[in-house]
Image: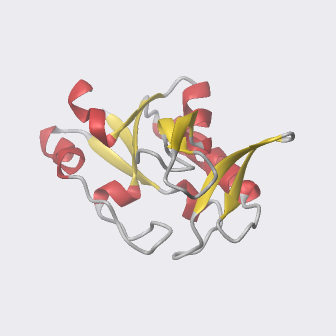
Amino acid sequence: MDILVSACLLGHSCRYDGGSKRCEAVCRLADVGHTLIPLCPEVEGGLTVPHAPCELRKTPDGVRAISIDGVDCTAQYEAGARIAVEKAQSSGARVAILKSKSPSCGCGTVFDGTFSGTLREGWGIAAAALRDVGVRVIDENHVANL
């Protein structure tokens, strides 16, 4: 099965802080015949590595991706989400394993936009876009449920 995977979970140094979050349980899926397709919506949408951390903030104009410096990065997040959907459609991937709590990839829980470490219910911008086109989206903590 072809599976889209947050590139940071595969050990790619693409997170906002220049690091990765390699997840062995995710990487081992390749050993049992799955094709893992790396995806980093933030980088593919135009953000640099490293970049200022961003969180999703609810505003009167909808949810916006705002950096800790107050810069609105929503356009880059939305561009990355479009690329994620294109990758899913071109590869035929019907499953995505994405990084929990990320403003791009969070699956059901994201940081609340206050940069206080507080979580709220919600979906990252790319995760929501993939879900909306019928891709099954889970985070690295639910790989056993595949």
Residue sitting nearer the eye, 100 or 4: 100
Q: Residue at x 64, y 60 (%)?
A: 45
Task: Answer with the quarter of the image where residue 63 lies.
Answer: top right
The location of residue 143, given as percent across then percent down, is 26, 34
Q: Residue at x 62, y 35 (%)?
A: 129
The location of residue 120, given as percent across then percent down, is 54, 37
Q: Residue at x 31, y 42 (%)?
A: 140
Residue sitting nearer the eye, 114 or 58: 114
Instruction: Name the colour scheme.
Output: secondary structure
The location of residue 59, given as percent across then percent down, is 80, 43
Question: In the visual, does 59 lie left or right of 46?
Answer: right
Residue sitting nearer the eye, 56 or 95: 56
Give the number of callouts. Answer: 0
Check the image and name the residue furthest to the left. Answer: 31
The location of residue 17, given as percent across then percent down, is 46, 73
Task: Answer with the quarter of the image where residue 54 lies.
Answer: bottom right
- Is residue 87 depicted above or below 7 in this figure? above
Work out which quarter of the rendered image holds the N terminus and state it.
top left
- Is residue 69 depicted above or below 24 in this figure? below
- Is residue 74 depicted above or below 35 in this figure? below
Work out which quarter of the rendered image holds the C terminus and state it.
top left
